[in-house]
Amino acid sequence: MKKIINLFKNPKVKMVIILSILLFIYTTICAFSYAQNISTDIASSVFRLHVLANSDSQEDQNLKYKVRDNLLAYMNEICKDCWAKQEAINLVEKNKDAFKQIALETIKNEGYSYDVNISIGNFEFPTKEYGDISLPAGFYDALRVEIGEAKGQNWWCVMFPPLCFVDISSGIVPDESKEQLESTLTEEEFALVSDHSDSEIQFKFKLLEFFNRNGLITAKK
């Protein structure tokens, strides 16, 4: 113990320790700043869909997917010519009652009487993969659809750019959707969400996930 204490009294050792601590603090600040900026930029470029089932029963889960499919079909219809996130949000806001009516009619046609609550806001999302595109956890603008008691499992997707696809087993996002996403992100940001082969890109994505999952950054506006 005395040797350790005496070691710390050595001016050179003290200087090394101080410099190491300062370097660690500087690196952490830089990493945090990088993750904050990237997370905010990515979140500000997409508009998402969040559907909550009434319960976790198989029937309610199947109903959730039917509601999802019909909402996405309508979204693709009214937003097929959109090339800006805010334009898509404005159209959804303008047609919010139509979205609710579609959900209610789907539920009724399937033999249920659940009510539906629809809202547009900034909500928390986990890290999600959409085919060969991955989006980090964070807060994103989204259309939230709550079916009945909304106590069942969630379903997440990206309404703009349209990254949703029914055949998720194919693992392929349409090229046009990628082009829309790429046009709104920097080259590095697009690489972060689309390139899973580069080790440096993978590390940066994990860094982004770490800060988001631990609540250190939220990407809120």
Image (cartoon, rainbow, N blue to C red):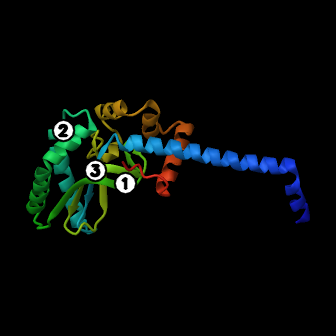
Q: Position of residue 53 (x, y in %)?
A: 24, 63
**At which x and y percent is residue 199?**
56, 39
How far is the residue under mark 3 from the one under mark 1?
A: 10 Å
Q: Is residue 134 visible?
A: yes
| Mark sitting on residue 142 | 3
| Callout 2 secondary element | loop
Residue 178, position in %: x, y? Answer: 34, 34
Residue 114: which quarter of the image?
bottom left
| Total marks placed | 3
Residues at marks 1 and 2, CA–CA distance in whole angstroms: 23 Å
Instruction: Give the mark nearest the N terminus, 3 or 1.
Output: 1
User: Which comes sooner in the sequence, label 2 or label 3?
Assistant: 2
Which one is in front, 13 or 35? 13
What residue is at 27 percent from the left and 53 percent from the top?
Answer: 121
Regarding mark 3 in the picture, which secondary structure is present there?
strand
Q: In this picture, is 26 found above or below 50?
A: above
Q: Residue at x 49, y 55 (%)?
A: 216
- In the picture of the structure, the residue carrying the numbered disc 2 is 79
Which type of secondary structure does the marked residue at label 1 adopt? strand
Is the residue marked by circle 2 packed among few (<14), some (14-19), or many (20+) residues within 10 Å?
some
Q: Are marks 3 and 1 in contact (CB under 8 Å)?
A: yes
The amino acid type, in three-letter code, at marker 3 is Ala
Image height of 147 relative to 39, above or below: below
Q: Which mark is residue 125?
A: 1
